[in-house]
Image (spheres, rainbow, N blue to C red):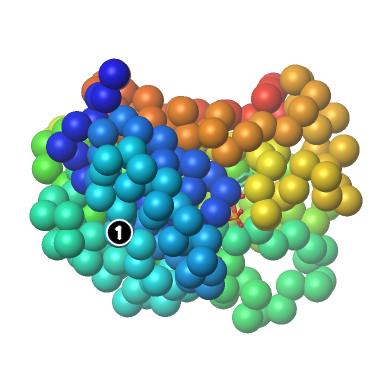
Amino acid sequence: MSTMNGTAVLVTGGSRGIGAATAVRLAREGADVAFTYVKDEARAKEVAARIEATGQKALPLRADAADAGDAAGAVEWAADALGRLDVLVNNAGVGVLGPLDALPLAEVDRVLAVNVRAVFLASQAAAGRLPEGGRIITIGSCMAQRVPGPGGVLYALSKTALIGLTKGLARELGGRGITANLVHPGPIDTDMNPADGPYAEGQATLTALGRFGTAEEVASTVAFLAGPEGRYVTGAEFAVDGGYAA
Ligand code: NDP
């Protein structure tokens, strides 16, 4: 059954991984989907074709979340191109791990620009366009809840900032019937964190279920929050992490 018929969605970073799975899942629920990407036009076209195969509109846009103008502009563009905007999924992110003394200022600025500033700017722009019932759903990380060893300081900082952002948005926008929630994936098999990568086994061991998750398993929680069943949920965090933070 389609639950999101007639709605319009923007997913940032929708050309691969969790963002691509989310874009396709929300299209299957009946939404028209705009999504951003920055490098890989061929992968973006593949995702657009999968969305169109569901019968929904697909609008890929090259927009770099590291750029403040692009981060806010993508929201305005999507709302104009689709004629409305009901759901923003802040998914684009970069995973940078490394010891404290090996993180140069430029890297700190890039990670905070993509993982934090862009989420703030996109949410700020979306707040001006979302109607009553609108949704802001942000992809955080299990590392906002548990940093299992050295090397995660910058990434954990960037993802933990999203907790305060989400709670603040929930309070700011609740009076207009708009919700804001945060989904914390555990180790998910994507290009960023392949299940056959050099650090995969250790990550799987840290989960209660003993395995990586799939992008589709994260997308299903996003679909719940984006759809009618999720309308009374706001300011909340959802661990989709196989028990990583348990
Ligand atoms: P991937 O690296 O597999 O995919 C990232 C997507 O974001 C791509 O579509 C990429 O586009 C896009 N993207 C990257 N940088 C930018 C940018 N500056 N502007 C716009 N788009 C951009 O990542 P995942 O799917 O694994 O991760 C998605 C989210 O989930 C991130 O926020 C990540 O931090 C979070 N996460 C992931 C976990 C995991 O284990 N995989 C665990 C916890 C959280 P392009 O192809 O053009 O580069």
Asked if residue 113 shows in the view, the reply is no
The quadrant the C terminus occupies is top right
Residue 16 higher or lower than 6, as above or below = below
Q: Which amino acid does label 1 sit on?
A: Leu
Residue 131 higher or lower than 70, as above or below = above
For label 1, the residue is 59
Residue at screen point 27% across, 40% down: 55
Residue at screen point 75% across, 48% down: 194
* Residue 142 placement: quadrant: top right
Q: Quadrant of ligand 1?
A: bottom right
Within 10 Å of disc 1 (Cα), the crowding (few <14, some 14-19, many 20+) is many
- Does residue 29 appear to the left or right of 239 in the view shown? left
Q: Position of residue 151 (x, y in %)?
A: 80, 56
User: Which sits in the foreground, 178 or 48?
Assistant: 48
Q: Where is residue 56 in the image (x, y as percent from the top left)?
A: 26, 43
Q: Position of residue 15 (x, y in %)?
A: 49, 57
The quadrant the N terminus occupies is top left
Residue 119 higher or lower than 19, as above or below = below
Q: Position of residue 86 (x, y in %)?
A: 20, 43
- Does residue 118 appear to the left or right of 125 in the view shown? right
* Residue 72 placement: quadrant: bottom left
- Does residue 65 appear to the left or right of 130 in the view shown? right
- Does residue 76 appear to the left or right of 112 in the view shown? left
Number of numbered labels in the structure image: 1
SS state under label 1: strand
Residue at screen point 12% across, 43% down: 131
Residue at screen point 35% across, 67% down: 61
